[in-house]
Image: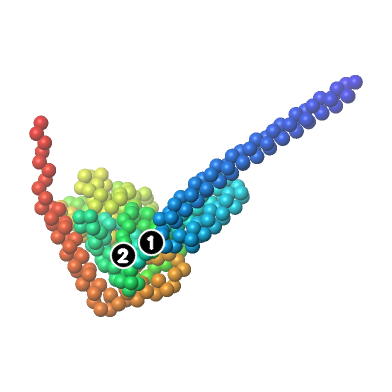
Amino acid sequence: MKYSVCMFAAAVAASAMFVGCFGKKDEASKNKEGVLSGAKEAVSAVADKASDAVAAAADKTAEVAEAAKDKAAEAVEAVKEGADAAAEAVAGAVAGAAAAVAPKEGTIRMITEATFPPYEFRQGKEVVGIDVEICKAIAKALGKELAIEDVEFDSVLPSLIAGKAELAAAGITVTEDRKMQVDFSVPYVRTGIVFVYAKDKPFEKGEDAKGKKVGVQNGTTSADYVREKLGQEPEMFDSPASAFAALKAGKVDVVIADIDPAKAVIKGQDGYDISDLLTVEEYAVAIKKGQPELLATVNKVINGLKDSGELDKITDDMTAKANAMAAAEEAKPAEAPKAE
Ligand code: GLN
């Protein structure tokens, strides 16, 4: 009797466990379905966006739509492989959608970040600078008009990779890390980064900034320098000028920036100076990987500008233009104090 009660109890327990397990499994598969259908919805929303974009790109509609569809289908496949893959697939489909936005017929797009005189800066609404002139020459060689996209510096290469432009030129230093993501042209200038400091608190060597608050522009080689050479976190700003404003306001002890924009920000600012170069860097134009023909054209144009002396002329012109703008900025009367 006791034995059979025991057996009965064991059987109940076992079936409870079974139901428990089964219940859990059911729950898990419900969750998975939830994730899958959520991800599928996201992917199809993205695919919809891609086709909207395709409609806008009048000429290449059929071809581009096919590519976007394939990307979305690939994404759906990946979603089936699990929740983690879903995030990646959606990101892939987003990139696919972005890539589907083809340039207007007859134009080539340059992506840049226009707070970097004399390489790229705004004159009124227009983006001008050395990089703009280089890209105009590339566009001309291709028989196209240049269109300019202005984004934050840390978005320049991701946007290029996502297909939002064909050329990236933003005083971009060639680095080993970046070489893994994009193809670089031949370099067009040798330059580097410097300290920008208040004359009464000079900074000369890297070590001088150890443990100090160092302002840099987001995503730049100056930020890398602070992390790698000084072993600390920099204070981030969205332009060399805003980092310099923080220095003037006493919010950082020193700024690190590329030498030419650094010279531009201290123009007419008596109490400030720059150090010697802390690094040697080279700028180049970046393009999406795997386009040997475009790369050859870009290189030919840059080598031509260098050999003919045209690049020196462009550099002098744009430096003068940026300085004239800085001088005009300085001559502006200070805002009148408001009456109480
Ligand atoms: N040359 C630096 C870099 O590539 C800064 C470029 C910039 O801020 N536009 O990181």
Asked if one can make out residue 293 in the rendered structure from this viewpoint, the answer is: yes
Which badge, 2 or 1, is on the more N-terminal residue? 1
What residue is drawn where x is 37% and y is 70%?
Answer: 185
- Within 10 Å of disc 2 (Cα), the crowding (few <14, some 14-19, many 20+) is some
> Does ligand 1 reach within 8 Å of label 1's beta carbon?
no
Provide residue 284's location: percent of width, then percent of height: 34, 67
- Within 10 Å of disc 1 (Cα), the crowding (few <14, some 14-19, many 20+) is some
What residue is drawn where x is 56% and y is 55%?
Answer: 74
Q: Gap in Å between the C-alphas at discs 2 and 1?
A: 10 Å
Mark 2 highlights which residue? Answer: 146
In the rendered view, does 290 fall on the left or right side of 223?
right
Provide residue 80's location: percent of width, then percent of height: 61, 49
Is 248 or 118 nearer to us in this picture? 118
- Say which element carries label 1: loop
Provide residue 215's location: percent of width, then percent of height: 29, 50
Asked if one can make out residue 261 in the rendered structure from this viewpoint, the answer is: no
Is 89 or 182 nearer to us in this picture? 89
Task: Name the mark on residue 103.
Answer: 1
Instruction: Single out the residue that lies furthest toward the top.
Output: 1
Is 111 or 219 nearer to us in this picture? 111
What residue is drawn where x is 27% and y is 57%?
Answer: 114
Could you tell me which quadrant the C terminus lies in?
Answer: top left
Question: What amino acid is labelled 1 in the image?
Answer: Pro
Question: What amino acid is labelled 2 in the image?
Answer: Leu
Instruction: Single out the residue that lies furthest toward the right.
Output: 1
In the rendered view, does 51 fall on the left or right side of 211?
right
